[in-house]
Image: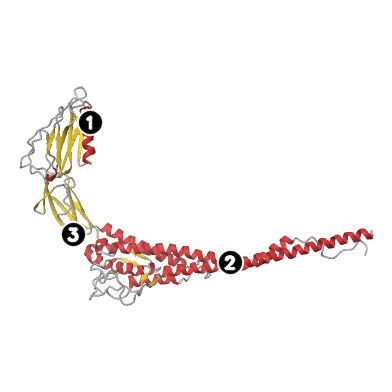
Amino acid sequence: MTGGISFSGLASGLDSGAIIEALIQAERVPINQLESRRADEQTRIDLIGTFRGLVGNLRSAAESLSTAGGFLSFAAETNLPGWVDVSADETAIAGNHTFEPQVLATADRWVFDSVTAPDADLGTVDGQSVSFDYDGTTYSFAFDAADSSLDEIAAAINAGTGGDVTATVVNSGTAATPSYELVLSGSQSGEPYRITNIASTVTGLTIDGTPPDAGGVAQSANNLTVAGNAFAIVDGILVERTSNDFSDVIPGVSFTMLDADPAGGSPVVNVSVAPDREAIRSGVQEFVDSYNAVIGFINGQNQVDEDGQTDSVLFGDSLLSSVGRTIRGALFSTGLPSGTSADTGFETLNLVGVELQSDGTLQIDDAVLNAKLDQDVNAVADLFADVDGFDNGGVPVGDPLQFVDTTADTGLADDLMRALDLVLKDQPGPSTTRFTSPFNARTEALNESIRRINDRIEIEEDRIASYEQFLINRFTALETLMGQLNAQQAYLNTQLG
């Protein structure tokens, strides 16, 4: 054995760390697969959350159209906008009205006799006061002689009345010959809101507080404006209000008088109230957009490439198909609505210009929808809205998961809203039980799957940790043995020289 003694392979310089790492990586393949599954499950949860949001938006859009008040919008127009401002809400009725301004409502204003300086004290002894009554409250402000300037009196009144009466110091003179006056103004217009019993015992601040006569004519030069009611002739009837707001005269229509000629020079203003076609169409468009967002999501998740492959984790998911069937069932169920005996041209979405496309989305035919709104806006509203109301207050009937409206008029938007409630929200069941909604059930199942995967990963991690320690121990023993053999080899080589 020339060349010394050797043990084949024992001194070959093995990289035990790399060997152990490779063995561990091989053992981690099942964990990597579990982690990939967990990531897919989390992606499913995130996508279902996105889908829930889109369905919730559709539910909100349907709710907006589910009542006549929500669907119908009216606009009011006038031929003379400078005299009266008009508006209409959903309770209005289409028609024409006349509005003839007579007298504008006014607020009370009084002015004290002028003084030469706003910061000069006007009182001569402590306790002198300014007092008045307004809106059933008596106000009285006493001043020390050293704190009785016009500015200080105005500040005290503004703080003490809480804005019901405003005190203002104005210079009615010129810069060379100033003349400062304290003006009191009532915050509200109308005869009931007059400032009465106004008086001053402050030596340097005087006023004639004589009230107006029974006809509302000022009897004092200090009474700048007498608070008076507004008068207008609405549809030939004289109407009186304390303000210029006549919103409670005709249901759903508000008139705000802007100008009037008490001498009889006010014109007769023509007011037309009609359905606001643009606002109604905007509501329908919002509904269509929300619907298309849901259908687009479903179509996108179920899309495959030309090889029949897909990278969507929700491909074929039962939740997608369930929600799709629910929406189609509410909007496109065959037959005329319950209680309808004949086809009048307003019974389906397609008939009013909301057309179903080949991909399942909706598109509005503006010409058809506008024509239907012009023909009978209430009939279009009936298609979407539950005009007569849900007959059992929204309580499940029969099958706990079915909300039944047996009235003749249901409305597609109302049907869809209630149908989507069943897939979005848990529902009460018998006694204290609850029926879990499809969205919640699917999310809970995925979360449970992730919990199970986490448990398996934890078990595998513990097993691999033990296996890794086993390998370290074995390779450590191998390295120890190799060291001993190498030492023996060196010794023998030395001895045999």
**Left-right relation of 384 to 289:** left
* Residue 457: mark: 2
Q: Earlier in the sequence, mark 3 or mark 1?
A: 3
Extreme residue toward the top, this view = 176
**Amino acid at circle 1:** Asp
Residue 64, image x, y percentages: 30, 61
**Left-right relation of 417 to 205:** right
- Could you tell me which quadrant the N terminus lies in? bottom right
**Residue topped by disc 1:** 151
Q: Secondary structure at mark 2?
A: helix
**Amino acid at circle 2:** Ile
Extreme residue toward the front, this view = 126
Q: Secondary structure at mark 1?
A: helix
**Is 150 or 299 nearer to us in this picture?**
150
**Mark 3: few, some, or many residues within 10 Å (few <14, many ≥20)?**
some
**Mark 1: few, some, or many residues within 10 Å (few <14, many ≥20)?**
some
The residue shown at (49%, 67%) is 447
* Residue 395: mark: none
Q: Earlier in the sequence, mark 2 or mark 1?
A: 1
**Residue topped by disc 3:** 94
Residue 298, image x, y percentages: 43, 67
